[in-house]
Amino acid sequence: QVIYLNGKYVSKEDAQISVYDHGFLYGDGIFEGIRIYNGNIFKSREHLDRLYDSAKSIMLDIPLKQSEMQEVLNETIRRNELRDGYIRLVVSRGPGDLGLDPRRSPKANIIIIVEQLSIYPEEAYINGLKTVSVSTRRNVPDALNPKIKSLNYLNNILVKIQANLAGVGEAIMLNSQGYVAEGSSDNIFIIKRGVIFTPPCYCGALEGITRAAIIEISDKLGYKVKEEPFTLHDVYVADEVFFTGTAAEVIAVREVDARTIGEGKAGPITMNLLKEFRKLVEIDGVK
Ligand code: PLP
């Protein structure tokens, strides 16, 4: 396994950064999780756009132009000889002193890790996941806009801990107003009477790249999609519920807080969207 670290390609053992890195000390940094399908980076431009937007928003200077970052990604994949896998791209504020001041961390750290990935067994895509809602809330409006994919993932980790305790793989987080926001690392969709709903980003959802792809696919297939706030009640009584994310793709939910969703397995629209999504990932190359 070859890891990219600030211009060098090093082994896992040699991939080391300072304990003074503000990404480590304060969660001061940003990241992306990206998929490689068939040797191609899926939605590469969209991921890099989001990374560079996140960087701009938190005034973090990435010492590579976006086109250079693209080349570095390609080279890291090439060196790892991986045709299907997952890329973790992290840019932290870099080493500084113990104070908060980012001016004392002038040099960002850039790390790219490429790995194999299989998150859910194929059976889960057909039978759906059990999930629960958790008490961890996303505050909206928040100084830390959910559109920024920052290294501050404590909220999401708390959701994951609650999911683990409930024995489920993903859980539903509400925002401080009680509307559904998203999962620990996935966006959420519900379907009622043929209409597809997903929370708008101002409800506390990340502007997911898979979410955007599914909205686009739904439009193409002629489904009506609404970005509208909704509550847990709407989730419980939905005909279909599914999560989307780079790692999970499109995964159906069969049960939420012990309420069976629809027929208790992946519904027809969810299956259709998954099928179309998988067609898309096969043909989508580096753009
Ligand atoms: N929500 C959160 C908090 C995430 O971390 C992720 C994963 O990146 C997602 C949603 C799904 O977004 P994407 O489809 O871009 O992977």
Image: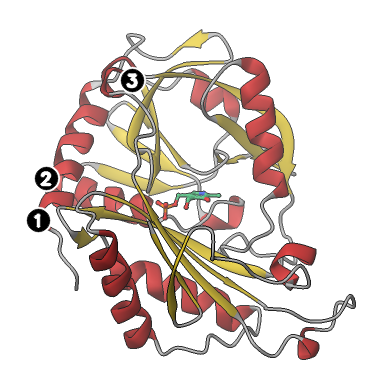
- Compared with 106, 230 (above or below) is above
Write down the residue under mark 1: 283
Q: Residues within 10 Å of mark 1 (few under 14, many from 20)?
A: few
Residue lying at 58% horizontally and 88% vertically, measured from the top left: 61
Closer to us: 29 or 226? 29
Mark 2, secondary structure of its residue: helix
Q: CA distance from mark 3 to mark 1?
A: 24 Å
Mark 3, secondary structure of its residue: helix
Q: Residues within 10 Å of mark 3 (few under 14, many from 20)?
A: some
Label 2 is placed on what type of residue? Lys
Q: CA distance from mark 2 to mark 1?
A: 7 Å
Q: Position of residue 116 (x, y in %)?
A: 33, 45
Q: Position of residue 146 (x, y in %)?
A: 61, 59
Query: Contact (CB < 8 A) between labels 3 and 1?
Result: no
Residue lying at 18% horizontally and 51% vertically, measured from the top left: 281
What is the total number of numbered labels drawn onto the structure image?
3
Disc 3 C-beta below 8 A from ligand 1? no
Write down the residue under mark 2: 279
Q: Residues within 10 Å of mark 2 (few under 14, many from 20)?
A: few
Label 3 is placed on what type of residue? Ala
Write down the residue under mark 3: 124
Q: CA distance from mark 3 to mark 2?
A: 19 Å
Query: Contact (CB < 8 A) between labels 2 and 1?
Result: yes
Q: Which mark is residue 38?
A: none
Quadrant including the C terminus:
bottom left
Label 1 is placed on what type of residue? Ile
Determine whether, in the image, residue 159 is placed left or right of residue 67: right
Determine whether, in the image, residue 77 is placed left or right of residue 6: left
Determine whether, in the image, residue 282 is placed left or right of residue 28: left
